[in-house]
Amino acid sequence: MTAPTVLRFGVFFQGVNFSTVWTEPESGSQIDFESFRRLAQTAERGLFSAFFLGEGLRLREHLGRLHQLDVAGRPDAQTQLAALAAVTSRIGLVATQNTTYNDPLDLAHRFASLDLLSGGRAAWNVVTTDNAWTGENFRRGGYLDHADRYRHAEAVVVAAKELWAAWAADIADSPDADAWSAGAPSPTVEVDTGHYRARGRSRLPQSPQGRPVLFQAGDSAEGRDFAARQADVIFSAHSAFDDAQSFAADIRQRTLKAGRPADDVKIFPGQEFILADTDAEAEEKARWVRRKQVTPQTAIAFIENIWGTDLSGYDPDGPLPDIDPVQDVTGETRGAGFRAAQAKTTADAWRERAEAEGLSIRELVIRLNSGRGFVGSPSSVAATLQRYADAGVVDGFNITPWLVPSGMDDIVDRLVPELQERGIYPTSYEGNTLRENLGLRPLDSAALARRTA
């Protein structure tokens, strides 16, 4: 019988979102370093593999104005993680950074800097943007054709990998100033994506893990193929067991086709955990959390994204509007979740569901946003996770806490010990680098052994 998978956890500190209950008195600031420090150190105490920061390049808007109902805006991800590197020692530090609006070689150098200074704990969540709305925030202003977004992103990632590998090995470990200017220079790395053109040389030696770990979250066929070719870890929205099983089979097949071992790309679905002493108490707590996440104002704003007009005169505890949307296709100002939705088709489907299930506006929005989540006592949630581990359909979960910064406490204090007793969660960190603590293969075992020695 195959041994169960040892599950690993990451914590996802989201950017703009309403899954975080930020109106409670114990909710921390989204710009105060203390919130980030406490969450990262709690996760490290729970042997989490990674601390993951989401990031957007423009504040979201709603009906032409800045949207003020969600958590919005925070300091730069790489700056935050550099500060966290000084107050943590093992947990990985994952920054979301966009391939469209960053210079490839400058971005690669900044990641190499974080990786070196943290002792090999840096990672890049690779994202790509193709819309002009985001592009307006940048001097160049342009945007990519939708079909070109992954072609450009892959060229950026390949250039970054070449830069990370380009440091001359014979001077990588020397503290001697003369040695740093001796010997053959590092080769020149060039990148030309049609959107960017750049050339440069590596200015830093490799970290103990070789290079930053690469995460990716695209769910289209192009995104999955990109991950199979270039990523070390793929995030997914496929956390329900049967869905996770199908997703894993697809990713492993694509990874094999890309010429890599089937398990070379680790799979981490996004997930929320709501725990209490008993299953019944957890269900009651979950109902409370959902209503805190979806306030009456949030519910109205949510459906306004489809209708495209002011619906503030409607009762959130009443039926959906009987008028049709004023827009045909939704835009990107409120994020990928609404982008390019067929407005009338979506509105008709929502009204049909609301009528069939007797749901008000707010109740419908809660249902639409409650698809993910393990709810129960620590022992029952651990039993659920045992099924995933036994089947090997995931390598871990990227957990979104519903409360920041204290939302990880019960997971670390109560769920992790249950998983450890079952033998499906680490009892110590496997090493000092993120690559080791994700169970990834070394990039070059011989070189890694020399550096470790």
Image (cartoon, helix red, strand yellow):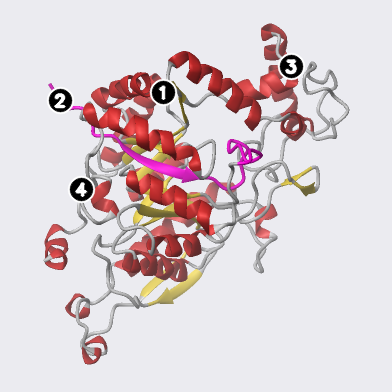
Prevailing secondary structure of the magenta residues: loop
Asked if the residues shown at circle 1 and circle 2 are in contact, with their CB atoms under 8 angstroms apart, the answer is no
**What is the crowding at mark 3: few (fewer than 14 residues within 10 Å), some, or many (at least 20)?**
some
The amino acid beneath tag 2 is Thr
Which label is found at residue 360?
3
442 displayed left or right of 316: left
364, 265: nearer the viewer: 364
Residue carrying label 2: 2
The reply to whether the magenta stretch includes residue 13 is yes
Q: Closer to us: mark 2 or mark 3?
A: 3
Q: Name the residue under label 4.
A: 430
For marks 4 and 2, give the CA distance. Answer: 21 Å
Quick one: SS at disc 2? loop
- Taking the spot 54% from the left edge, 47% from the top edge, the residue there is 147
Q: Which residues lie in the magenta part?
A: 1-25
**The label number, if any, that marks residue 152 in the structure image:** none
Mark 1: amino acid: Asp
Residue identified by numbered label 1: 243
Q: Mark 1 vs mark 2: which is more N-terminal?
A: 2
The crowding category of the residue bearing disc 2, from other C-alpha atoms within 10 Å (few below 14, some 14 to 19, many at least 20), is: few
Q: Residue furthest right?
A: 313
Closer-to-camera residue (146/168): 168
Disc 3 + disc 4, Cβ < 8 Å: no
The answer to whether residue 367 is above or below residue 446 is: above
